[in-house]
């Protein structure tokens, strides 16, 4: 490493000279002029502030990094470069296949012969973003100790978030005034009081860098808090680097945040040229039985992933217009889960005849999924990655569900730079073998699906499994999820349990409660809300998570048969964070609407103006039965875009509707 005689600190730039060196104003506004970023000097630090309309949203807030090897000379000149961008791009799948990326940019650079250092700002109509970029010749490497980025709220704000945690996102939401938050993870959604804007702090394009959580440093100021590595270092970085974007989505309503494309717009276009093998799917799987305790992952009398069950699930998928089948517990090693964690990713248990199952699935036009639970044993998984994925490709498999239920060796955090690099390695290796990824216990979504469209979906919040062995997810949680976790991208929540009181499991004398005792557990919503969640909780790989026995002969399962996971367009229509939500998606000529409420009964009037004008549709409505939460009332009527749908929801209920052109 070269000697570093200057301050190893890129903020606190002794910025007195900065503005005198400017040739233009250090500010940039959104294309519609409503949102403005100013770069300011305060206490020798480079800072930014954000205004919306005539109100300040973010007061001057510190920028910068504390890093060995990243030294900004005090006499560097500040240069400001403005530019604009406007492009509508398309993606192979997503909530919206067409997205407009329209922003004004300002690059603020401090450079001399030894370093080019830039903070790049973008102002969109739906929010702001900035990131740090450097190219230094004054060192061989950069060792990051801290990121100084702050978000200082000008006014009182209410917030919705999970606590900051470098290991898991499977935590409950808190609804707290910003000045009572100790720490938080992102997305960190807020509402400025009273009647002010809505917003959400998150990050975009997270590569080779730890995740950003937030800690409150006083008053209403939150600061970046990066996941460290065991030696306390936040990241070992190259001499030429761009950090992830720090983002603040901004909207007039909470639904505006859901309808924003800002996170994807801050990611690079696809690196996968031929995306024809990347396809959204609906799937079922041998899965819920293990969580309920009626099946086991390990081989034995109640083993779930047997050849016989595989054939049953494949037949069910083929008969019900589904495309994929997942099997958990198919491969050797589950006896070591929670112990020393050694999985064999290419060796099936003796009662799972993978070759004949793969050829049977292919004869039925059904996709087989491989499941890779790692238990957190990253070194072994990485060593096996190439050969494993090559093997799956040879079997005609196109989807892998990964899992990291267990601590990483050596004290590494799931969300550290080490973790981020691992998750990315899996995505890129999978792309080589034309495999799509569904990651559980993942790193948070930051829009990398635009660049790596085989990174389909992930967990990263409390999913359905929590209903099997805990007090479960409340209707309030489900009404918060779309406005917080889902702002980052798709989630494999694994929705759609029909036996919501677990009657079948409770009547199974051989049930061995997993993580039990679980007798008190149940689904905390109505059946109609379970159906609506297939629309509300977006995932391009969408699961019907219940045991297939619980769907057989159920008229309500028609919704999932008719549903198309490959949507073209989506819109959050109405909602209040934690209280209710209504979302519509279009796939081809059909529309699917999902609405849900909290523990209170609620009526919504939803104008159908999103439907194509001049077309008459059959609306098939799956509504709450007010007298029985386990039942839905299914009705049909003709509607046009001139009509208004009156949605009636029971406490913890919902409604789902398909609109098919006549
Ligand atoms: C946790 C995952 O979220 C769940 O889907 C899976 O069944 C278990 N780990 C076992 O891999
Ligand atoms: Ca999980």
Image: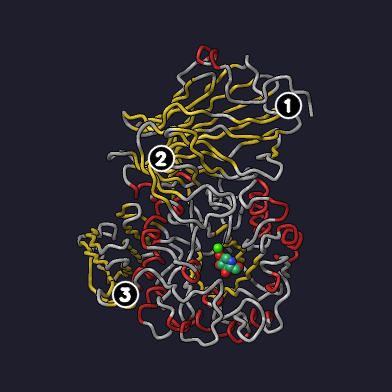
Q: CA distance from mark 3 to mark 2?
A: 36 Å
The residue nearer to you, when weighing 25 against 625, is: 625
Residue behind mark 2: 178
What is the basis of the colouring in this image? Answer: secondary structure
Which of the image's four quarters has the C terminus? bottom left
Instruction: Name which residue lies at 64% across and 81% down.
Output: 357
N-terminal label among 3 and 2: 2
* Image spot of residue 402 (x, y percent): 62, 63
Which of the image's four quarters has the N terminus? top right
The residue nearer to you, when weighing 401 against 61, is: 61
* Image spot of residue 337 (x, y percent): 67, 69
Residue behind mark 3: 629
Which element carries disc 1, helix, strand or loop?
Answer: loop
Pointers 3 and 2 in contact (CB under 8 A)?
A: no
Is residue 188 in view from this perspective? yes
N-terminal label among 2 and 1: 1
N-terminal label among 3 and 1: 1
Is ligand 1 closer than 8 angstroms to the Cβ of mark 3?
Answer: no
Q: Quadrant of ligand 2?
A: bottom right
Q: Is residue 188 left or right of residue 349?
A: left
Which element carries disc 3, helix, strand or loop?
Answer: strand
Instruction: Name which residue lies at 49% across and 60% down.
Output: 462
Residue behind mark 1: 137
Q: Is residue 621 left or right of residue 134?
A: left
| Pair 3/1: label in front | 3
Is residue 457 in view from this perspective? no
């Amino acid at each position: 490493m070269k000697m570093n005689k200057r301050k190893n600190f890129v903020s606190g730039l002794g910025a007195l000279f900065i503005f005198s060196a400017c040739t233009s104003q250090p500010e940039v506004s959104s294309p519609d002029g409503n949102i403005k970023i100013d770069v300011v000097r305060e206490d020798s630090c480079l800072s930014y502030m954000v205004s919306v309309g005539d109100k300040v949203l973010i007061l001057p807030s510190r920028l910068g990094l504390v890093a060995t090897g990243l030294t900004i000379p005090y006499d560097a000149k500040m240069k400001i470069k403005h530019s604009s961008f406007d492009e509508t791009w398309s993606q192979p799948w997503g909530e919206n296949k067409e997205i407009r990326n329209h922003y004004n940019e300002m690059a603020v650079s401090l450079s001399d012969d030894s370093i080019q250092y830039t903070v790049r700002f973008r102002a969109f109509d739906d929010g702001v973003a900035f990131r740090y970029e450097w190219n230094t010749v004054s060192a061989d490497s950069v060792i990051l100790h801290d990121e100084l980025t702050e978000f200082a709220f000008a006014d009182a704000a209410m917030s919705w978030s999970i606590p900051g945690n470098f290991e898991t996102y499977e935590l409950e939401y808190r609804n707290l005034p910003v000045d009572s938050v100790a720490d938080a993870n992102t997305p960190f959604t807020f509402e400025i009081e009273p009647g002010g804007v809505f917003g959400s702090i998150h990050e975009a394009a997270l590569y080779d860098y730890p995740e950003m959580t937030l800690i409150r440093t006083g008053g209403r100021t939150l600061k970046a808090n990066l996941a460290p590595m065991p030696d306390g270092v936040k990241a070992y970085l190259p001499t030429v680097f761009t950090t992830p974007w720090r983002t603040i989505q901004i909207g007039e309503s909470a639904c505006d945040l859901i309808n924003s494309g800002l996170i994807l717009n801050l990611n690079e276009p696809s690196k996968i040229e031929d995306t024809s093998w990347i396809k959204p799917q609906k799937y079922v799987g041998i899965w819920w039985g293990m969580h309920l305790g009626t099946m086991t992952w390990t081989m034995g009398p109640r083993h779930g992933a047997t050849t016989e069950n595989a054939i049953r699930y494949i037949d069910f998928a083929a008969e019900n217009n589904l495309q994929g089948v997942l099997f958990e517990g198919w491969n050797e090693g589950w006896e070591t889960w929670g112990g020393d964690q050694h999985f064999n990713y290419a060796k099936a248990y003796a009662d799972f005849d993978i070759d004949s199952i793969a050829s049977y699935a292919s004869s039925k036009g059904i996709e087989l999924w491989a499941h890779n639970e790692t238990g957190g044993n990253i070194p072994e998984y990485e060593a096996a990655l190439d050969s494993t994925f090559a093997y799956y490709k040879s079997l005609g498999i196109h989807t892998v569900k990964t899992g990291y239920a267990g601590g990483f060796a050596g004290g590494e955090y799931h969300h550290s730079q080490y973790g981020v690099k691992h998750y990315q390695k899996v995505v890129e290796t999978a792309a080589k073998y034309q495999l799509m990824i569904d990651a559980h216990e993942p790193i948070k979504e930051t829009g990398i699906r635009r660049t790596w469209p085989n990174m389909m979906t992930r967990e990263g919040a409390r999913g359905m499994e929590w209903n099997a062995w805990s007090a479960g997810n409340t209707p309030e949680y489900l009404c918060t999820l779309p406005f917080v976790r889902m702002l980052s991208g798709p989630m494999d929540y694994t929705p759609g349990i029909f036996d919501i009181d677990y009657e079948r499991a409770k009547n199974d004398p051989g049930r061995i409660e997993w993580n039990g005792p679980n007798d008190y557990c149940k689904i905390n919503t109505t059946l109609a809300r379970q159906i609506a969640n297939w629309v509300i909780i977006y995932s391009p790989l969408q699961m019907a998570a219940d045991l297939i026995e619980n769907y057989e002969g159920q008229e309500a399962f028609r919704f999932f048969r008719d549903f198309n996971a490959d949507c073209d367009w989506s819109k959050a229509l109405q909602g209040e964070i934690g209280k209710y939500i209504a979302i519509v998606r279009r796939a081809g000529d059909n529309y699917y609407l999902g609405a849900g409420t909290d523990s209170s009964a609620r009526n919504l009037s939803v104008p159908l103006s999103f439907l194509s004008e001049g077309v008459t549709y059959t609306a098939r409505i799956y509504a709450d039965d007010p007298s029985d939460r386990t039942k839905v009332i299914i009705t049909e009527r003709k509607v046009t875009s001139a009509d208004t749908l009156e949605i009636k929801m029971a406490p913890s209920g919902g409604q789902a509707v398909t609109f098919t052109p006549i």
